[in-house]
Image (spheres, coloured by chain):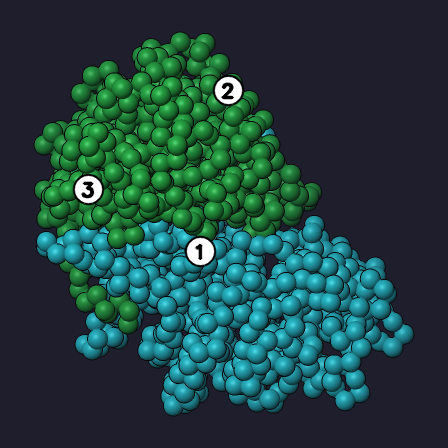
Chain colours: A cyan, B green
Amino acid sequence: MVFTPAVAEQRFVLDHVVGVGELGAEPDIVDAVLEGVGQFAEGEWAPLKRVGDVVGAKWSEDGVRMPDGFPQAYRAYVEGGWGTIGVPEAYGGQGLPFAIQTAVLETLGAANMAFALCPTLTVGAVEALQHHGTPEQQRLYLPKLATGEWTGTMNLTEPQAGSDVGALRAKAEPRDDGTWSITGTKIYISFGDHDMADNIVHLVLARTPDAPAGTKGISLFLVPKYRLNEDGTAGAFNDVRVVSIEHKMGLHASPTCVLSFGDHGDCVGELIGPVGGGMRAMFTMMNNARLNVGLQGVQVAEAATQKAVSYALERVQGARNGAQARIVEHPDVRRMLLRMKAQTQAARALVYYAAGMVDRAYKGDAEAKGRLELLTPLAKAHATDIGCEVSSIGIQVHGGMGYVEETGAAQFFRDARITPIYEGTNGIQAADLVGRKLGLDNGGVFARLVEDMRRDAEAEDLKALVETCDTVGRRLATAEADDKLAASYPFLTMLSTAVCGWLMERQLRAAGDDAFGRTKTAVARFYLDQVVPEALGLRAAATQSAAPLYAIEPEAFAA
Amino acid sequence: MVFTPAVAEQRFVLDHVVGVGELGAEPDIVDAVLEGVGQFAEGEWAPLKRVGDVVGAKWSEDGVRMPDGFPQAYRAYVEGGWGTIGVPEAYGGQGLPFAIQTAVLETLGAANMAFALCPTLTVGAVEALQHHGTPEQQRLYLPKLATGEWTGTMNLTEPQAGSDVGALRAKAEPRDDGTWSITGTKIYISFGDHDMADNIVHLVLARTPDAPAGTKGISLFLVPKYRLNEDGTAGAFNDVRVVSIEHKMGLHASPTCVLSFGDHGDCVGELIGPVGGGMRAMFTMMNNARLNVGLQGVQVAEAATQKAVSYALERVQGARNGAQARIVEHPDVRRMLLRMKAQTQAARALVYYAAGMVDRAYKGDAEAKGRLELLTPLAKAHATDIGCEVSSIGIQVHGGMGYVEETGAAQFFRDARITPIYEGTNGIQAADLVGRKLGLDNGGVFARLVEDMRRDAEAEDLKALVETCDTVGRRLATAEADDKLAASYPFLTMLSTAVCGWLMERQLRAAGDDAFGRTKTAVARFYLDQVVPEALGLRAAATQSAAPLYAIEPEAFAA
């Protein structure tokens, strides 16, 4: 099946959910970008999806080798300038809104999710350097990262330090020239090595000598794979070795690397930001990275939906009104397809809306900044949950064919399953929501979101859900820590559904009477009529205390 | 991780949910069987789970070759007599209740789900021959199928005939000696070929000459891979060729075959039951097979839960009360583990309860027969949905490790995903529920189930759910066909949850104050407090008409 970029839908959401007109992007340019990247992704990246899965990235002593076709298609991406969309003009970028960059990444990832993770990480490295790098670091690194000639990585996790980043042990020791000597092992480094770019810029969290324990002792370092020559080009090897790559269930074209820094005592890094400021700098990168992982949920949901619709429009099975029928004619198949579309559009609305807040926050809008912080865990967790759900329904629509790898539906299902895990598990997102975000501005950020939703909501179930979220959210804000955490995940799902319902209803109101508008109306109605009420069923779980979870001893779980 | 058979839990459910004492099984024998098969499965089959996944069954010109270790472990199964549990003594079996056989198959499949599908299919063939075979067919085939020396298959699906079995084209033409010449191609035949047994007995649906279109023209044929010698041993090849096997997302140790019958005009079959009676005979087999696929949901949920619990008890990450903690100590991890246990136990209660109805129905209990028919689609669909959900949570508990294949959590997730598809997709089950089962005995079968639940229910949410199911079910029973189908899946989930809640509350009441009882109490409470209320959120979807699903044209789904 050919992938079709969702240009009309993206444009509609940018207009009516994001309000892209207020962000300073020219409509003509927006159209040109959406259509241009759509053509590019459809023509160059989508055809590599299957080889990426079947062959995958391969490790060797000399480094990671990407499947045939990937290096060329990556060069085409660099040459097309698709990496530069959101980068400020000062660093060679096009300075378009983050929300537009979000749409670009959606299209690239819907065409080829594993591949698109590479530029996604590079974008994160650009942001970290843009906000925390020295002018010299920015001058040397940002233009190459902007184009994608060089790619970026994030290095947090170590075997004993996963969700608990503070437990990391990688070391940075000062050298005479002001640089740092880096040693340690990092795991789960996406695109930690590959053969598509001239250099790889690793952003590495490590401890300086005598640093305090926990997150306060962590600093961020810029560690290129190849040190820079005088002229700024990639030069000598910097003693960063890729030890192995993981054998994963999916996302095979994204090499997940174990990196060893400084095996020969010759790995040089530069400090980014102040000593001990690593977590803060990394969070700059991580917050937008969380939105971008939420966006992966949109990517895989969109791709899985397109594939399922295409199959349902072709596959003839069973009869309706006495005649053989395509399965799209059967009620339960329609229900599945509408659910796929509704959830996909809801996830897109949520992530794009948050992306628009990134732009507003950059412009100094404090309210937008708060709302972005509140919505980031929702966008990351709920959109990735949707990606998993939708790709699973996609298999179901295909029946037995869905379970056969050649069909491609299974790849979406396998690829999607990492997204609720990495970049902070969805459980960590839920903890962030109840532990930090609900309390922002003494609960004011949450209260103002609720107020906006309350003002707009028209559907009865949506109104009820908003009120339930308000009651439960205010209660959770002051609950004991364990009680917050016990209810965190159901509450995150409830609140996310309320926000999605609010944004879907907004689109319903904006929908015209053309073909696009009629489909949008049917899909939004489905969301409001079927998905929103389900979330009301989570109220019980979202108001439970932690006590029932501790009614038995740990070992009793094994009984 | 070592697999631990859930003997105490199985025994408890057999006692308190199934009422196995009323089925004529001696308690000592039940214990001996549960413990015996547990030891066998843990020692012989569980260790082959990973090689089954990584190496998988392999096709060659000479037939399908199972991974190393499987043929020996299968022989040990035959020698242990584990295939004979539920087979009547007249055919060399032990004549124990179907419910006990269910427990045996659960243990085998929790140890190695792909492997256990082979005896599961053989059990189905035994049932078909037991009820529809001639005495001669029974004499020749049943003893060997009972022990598992020979294995059985079901041959329904063809490329153009999936959910719509009536569309099949395989042909059976009469031969002079009263046998039939079989030709045609069947797909998705689990264990359609392998190298573990001396013969394979295919039960094949095919059309006789001049048969009417649709399901009425279908007859069932017994087609052995090797024809029988005079002495009843396997003899000459019967022209059944395995053309290929599918490359599936999971269940790799279960070869999914394309079988070609009669390529050389030399495939001989015997009619089972009357001409045109194929669907009826196949349904005998299929109904219990549906329970057994529901049981696969229990198998994979149990195995995934054990693995996740084991990991959570070992993995140290993050802190509680200032000290490093195992992740089992964190509230959201506890929530995930309790949910896994609650859903697994609920699925087991549902499937075992239905299995007990098989035994009661065999004894002539008409009420049990009706209840079994009503519950079969629930057991198949809901238990397999649970298998998928629980195996997905299992990955989440493992974090990044869950996505790495070596851990084994991903295998459960991949293996589980076929179960909502085969043996009648879960959508077909939902259609069966609203289209045929709700109306049994003019709605009396459903009404009496509701009455039983209403009489017993104590928890407020469970009471509310039972009343909702009653209202919605009665409404659906008389609704237009499309409206029934539109609401079928949400209603199936609601009703299944009500039945599970009813059976979990029954266990709660029966739970003692020992360690087992305390865990059972915590798990059942979680189900009643968190899972049951969620199902109330499905009411809106279960009362929607079909109209919103047809608000747009088929092609609009692609827009």
Q: Nearer the viewer, mark 1 or mark 2?
A: 2
Numbered tag placed on residue B79 in the rendering: 2
Tell me the amino acid under the disc marked 3: Arg
Say whether marks 1 and 2 touch (CB < 8 Å). no
Q: Nearer the viewer, mark 1 or mark 3?
A: 3
Front residue of A425 and B408:
B408
Q: Residue at x 73, y 67 (%)?
A: A62
Instruction: Indicate left or right for A185 with A57 as reference.
Output: right
Residue position for label 3? B207
Q: Position of residue B222 (x, y in %)?
A: 29, 32
**Mark 2: few, some, or many residues within 10 Å (few <14, many ≥20)?**
few
Q: Element under label 1?
A: helix
Q: Element under label 3?
A: strand
Q: CA distance from mark 2 to mark 3?
A: 38 Å
Front residue of A106 and A352:
A106
Q: Quadrant of residue B360?
A: top left
Front residue of A489 and B150:
B150
